[in-house]
Amino acid sequence: MDSIKPAVVLVIVVGLIAMMFWVFTSKMEAATFNSVTGKSVTTWQAMWIELRVQEPSK
């Protein structure tokens, strides 16, 4: 049991780092989309949908 504990901790830490990276990139994507289009998109929405600018900027 003691030999598995470091591996579990490592998997959890790597998972948390990956999640933080995903949230950060989604936050940046939402902010960029909002500034270019003038619309209001949240980080949560940016995490689950692909945002595209298909109209002229404001």
Image (tube, rainbow, N blue to C red):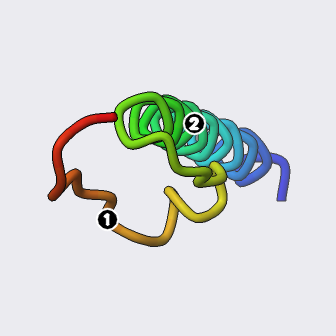
Label at residue 21 = none
Horizontally, residue 32 falls left or right of residue 10, namely: left
Residue nearest the observer in this picture, 10 or 38: 38
Tag 1 residue: 50
Q: Position of residue 55 (x, y in %)?
A: 18, 54
Q: How many numbered discs?
A: 2
| Quadrant (top left, top right, bottom left, bottom right) of the C terminus | top left
Q: Residue at x 33, y 58 (%)?
A: 51
**Which quarter of the figure has residue 44?**
bottom right
Tag 2 secondary structure: helix
Tag 2 residue: 27
Q: Residues within 10 Å of mark 1 (few under 14, many from 20)?
A: few
Q: Position of residue 20 (x, y in %)?
A: 63, 36
Mark sitting earlier along the chain (2/1): 2
Q: Residue at x 50, y 57 (%)?
A: 46
**55 shown above or below 6:** below
Tag 1 secondary structure: loop
Q: Hey, what amino acid is under mark 1? A: Glu
**13 shown above or below 50:** above
Q: Hey, what amino acid is under mark 2? A: Lys
